[in-house]
Amino acid sequence: MIDPLLNQLRREGFRTILTKTYRIDELFKCLEELVNLYTHISKQQNIHKEASKIIKKAFSLTLSTNSNIRGYLFNLIVKNIFDLEYKNTKINKTVEHNKQLREIDVYFEDENYRYVVECKSCVNFQNIQKEIRDWLNKKYTFFINWNKANNKNKPKKKLKIYFIISLKDSERINKIRKKFKKFDHITYYDQSFLDETAKKYQQKEIRSALKCFLNI
């Protein structure tokens, strides 16, 4: 799981994202150490603790704590989990409507729906609520209209919006649902959804990667 993720990081221009960081080569060395750790996963004890140390070291090499690295890694893990059930998932897909551009963290379609997946990897609940509120205020109407426009020129499909939140707290997720209940087409999932999906498909490596990430 991790080795393909690293390759995907390179293909998706991850090195470009890191142009504002110090010691880029050291950062990739940390990621490669993580690959090696998971390559010998069956022989390792306390693997999540060790992997967490490596990733924390990697993050410490970034220019600031506001780096997009954590969010990008979470997007990749979410994408890999949706890959288990859907075809042609896209990460950081840019769409256009009325000469406006918006980015989708993870995007895919099936016969009946277009799925817009917004990933929230913050560890602070108040920040998560703020990010969701900002997204709904700035992007919700855009995607509703974008989907309607698509239905004029393409096969008609309904829109589904998923918020994937890196918390494991059903009570807080329910608070979010109630707070933003006026917005249609939206489903909120916590980290349990990701783990249960990976477990359903017996993807131990994905579950390990998710657990490692969430322990950071």
Image: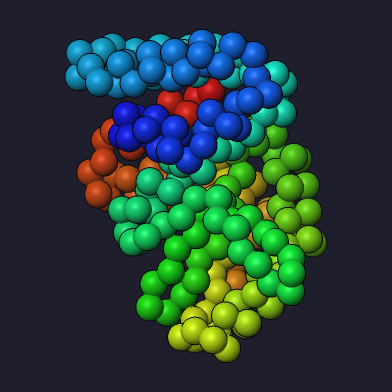
Q: Is residue 66 above or below residue 144?
A: above
Q: In this orientation, which residue lies closer to the viewer: 43 or 4?
A: 4
**The N terminus appears in which quarter of the rendering?**
top left
Q: Quadrant of residue 163?
A: bottom right
Q: Is residue 159 above or below residue 169?
A: below
Q: Give coordinates of residue 155: x percent, y percent.
A: 46, 86
- In the image, is 146 to the left or to the right of 105? right
Q: Give coordinates of residue 95: x percent, y percent.
A: 61, 64
Residue placed furthest toward the bottom:
152
Q: Quadrant of residue 122?
A: top right
Q: Give coordinates of residue 146: x percent, y percent.
A: 65, 75
Residue placed furthest toward the left:
42
What residue lies at 28% left-to-right and 11% top-to-bottom?
Answer: 45
Count of marks placed on residues = 0
- In the image, is 177 to the left or to the right of 86? right
Q: Is residue 212 above or below residue 113?
A: above
What residue lies at 55% left-to-right and 62% top-to-bottom?
Answer: 116
Which of the colour schemes (rainbow, by chain, secondary structure, one colour) is used?
A: rainbow
Q: Give coordinates of residue 40: x percent, y percent.
A: 23, 17
What residue lies at 51% left-to-right and 54% top-to-bottom?
Answer: 106
Q: In this orientation, which residue lies closer to the viewer: 64 or 169?
A: 64
Q: Quadrant of residue 67?
A: top right
Residue 151 in view here: yes
What residue lies at 49% left-to-right and 50% top-to-bottom?
Answer: 91
Residue 169 in view here: no
- In the image, is 79 to the left or to the right of 74? left
